[in-house]
Image: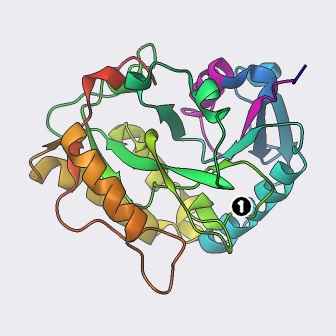
Amino acid sequence: MKIEKPVAAISMVRNDVFFADKWISYYGTQFGYENLYLIIDGMDQPLPKEASKINCFQIPHQNLKRAKGDRKRAKKISEFASTLYPKYKAVLAMDIDEFLVVDPKMKISLKAYLKKDFKTDSISALGLDVGQHPKFENGIDLKKTFLSQRQFAKVSDRYTKPIVSFKPLEWGSGFHRIKGKDYVIDPNLFLFHFGLVNKEITDKKSNKSELLSLGWRGHMARRFRLFKELETQTPQEGDLFFEKARHYLNKSRKWYSWNKPAPLKGPSIIKIPKRFQTIV
């Protein structure tokens, strides 16, 4: 009798009091808590409330500039992910504020979907960068799902990431690409990025002296443009935009970064379909 292999998820976290327990709860429900691997970056860091449910490792922190730190983290997680094969059918690697979702209209669990036979070494999900609308939305209530409280997102090449692997491989910085490999965007998967889901928490994080000293100022300034886009753009209906965006992102790339999608052209703020509201 053929034994079904499980699916694993890996992330690394530092200076977080907001996303880690959400990450554990979500992916634990999807894949089983025993199949989660979370690396805590720093011996001084508090453990998430649900750390005892999963495979949680605490490592010494190194103060590195943002770009170098991103590369080192991706390399470490890639090496660790490779040790999980052949035990697992698939291994996911992502930032702590990223949540992979299969479209609810498929009426299938994320785990069951990822256990299908894919003909590629990895798959990408369409990236949706969710932010708090500066005018219309309040802070996040952690007792409710994020998507019941947030209506809008930017369809983003930056978060259209190949976070799902089916064999050992090496991710580049931020898991935005796989070294030496092309990407394929799955028609039914979405990657929700919640880094700006709560503006007050984002503002506090952006002013931390540790991040500023390590070169995060410019990165945070670029990220904060999402708030302005949410405020000034008229949102498009998500379902009308998704197929067009996937087609463009699957085909378009810069010559110097051939294994990452090129940015979308024109406005890309969408209204998130209501069927996602109970998922994350």
Residue sitting at the far top = 143
Which secondary structure lies at badge 1? helix
Where in the figure is residue 42, as x and y percent of width and height?
79, 48
Q: Is residue 55 magenta?
A: no
Residue occupying image coordinates x 19% and y 55%: 229
Where does residue 197 sit, x and y in percent of width and height?
37, 38
Above or below, 68 against 193 in this view is below
Picture coordinates of residue 157, whole percent (x, y): 40, 61
Q: Residue at x 32, y 42 (%)?
A: 131
Apparent side of residue 236 relative to residue 248 in the rendered image (left or right): left
Q: Amino acid at mark 1?
A: Ala
Q: Quadrant of the N terminus?
A: top right
**Residue ranking furthest to the bottom:** 256
Residue at x 43%, y 25% (from the top left corner): 106
Residue 40 in percent (x, y) is at 77, 42
Inspect the magenta stretch and tell me whether residue 5 lies in it. Answer: yes
Whether 15 is drawn above or below 102: the answer is below
Residue nearer the viewer, 114 or 155: 114
Would you identify the image quadrant in which residue 130 lies? top left
Q: Which residues are magenta?
A: 3-30
Depth order, front residue of 106/83? 106
| Residue 221 can be seen in this image | no
Q: Nearer the viewer, residue 274 or 221?
A: 274
Residue that badge 1 annotates = 74
